[in-house]
Image (cartoon, rainbow, N blue to C red):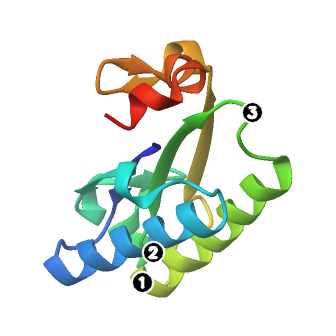
Amino acid sequence: MPILTVKISAPATPQLTQAIAEMLLAHSERILYKARQVTAIVIEYLPPEQWFIGGQSLATQGLNSFYCDIRITDETNSKQEKAQFIAETYAGFAALLGPVHEESYIHVHDVRATAYGYGGKTQEYRYHHPASDAQ
């Protein structure tokens, strides 16, 4: 049940948006073992003229960038899984966006189960009441 928030410094197209969503779903499912049906993704686009790294806009640098933020329940993934997710997701964005600035970020938030949930129930509640989650 992760939620991913993504900011992209490229022109928005339905094809790019779908490709990014599919790449993130695939990586979340295969690497982090997250269920596709409860994974949410929000994608926002910003003009390269409004994205600055080192005091220069990406437009003047001729590069794209991204920021990907994923929230997962604490203690559900290992360091190795998170490192693999970061490496493969960075490569996935580079493949979709073309040359990306090295200062493109993927942030994996480990959130306590008592402080995170969906549908009005915390992950802690879902852990202790798995039968009610199926309803």
Please state the horizontal and vertical placement of residue 59, each as a whole percent of the image.
33, 70
Specify few, some or many for label 3: CA neighbours under 10 Å numbering under 14, 14-19, or 20 or more: few
Side of 29 where 24 appears, left or right:
left
How many marks are shown on the rendered structure?
3
Please state the horizontal and vertical placement of residue 92, each as a whole percent of the image.
53, 78
Q: Which-is-in-front pick, marks 3 and 2? A: 3
Side of 29 where 84 appears, left or right:
right
Residue 133 or 70: which is nearer the viewer? 133
- Residue 8: quarter of image: bottom left
Q: Earlier in the sequence, mark 1 or mark 2?
A: 2
Specify few, some or many for label 1: CA neighbours under 10 Å numbering under 14, 14-19, or 20 or more: some
Residue at horizontal 27%, vertical 79%? 16
Q: Are marks 3 and 2 in contact (CB under 8 Å)?
A: no
Q: Secondary structure at mark 1?
A: helix
Residue under label 3 = 75
Q: Are marks 1 and 2 in contact (CB under 8 Å)?
A: yes
* Amino acid type at mark 3: Glu
Residue at horizontal 44%, vertical 66%? 25
Q: CA distance from mark 3 to mark 2?
A: 24 Å
Looking at this rendering, what residue extends furthest in the front direction?
Answer: 131
Q: Which-is-in-front pick, marks 1 and 2? A: 2
Side of 103 where 42 appears, left or right:
left
Tag of residue 23: 2
Tag of residue 24: none
Q: Earlier in the sequence, mark 3 or mark 1?
A: 3
Residue at horizontal 41%, vertical 79%? 62
Please state the horizontal and vertical placement of residue 76, each as a whole percent of the image.
71, 39
Residue at horizontal 25%, vertical 72%? 17
* Placement of 102 over or under 16, stated as above or below: above
* Amino acid type at mark 1: Leu
Specify few, some or many for label 2: CA neighbours under 10 Å numbering under 14, 14-19, or 20 or more: some
Residue under label 1 = 96
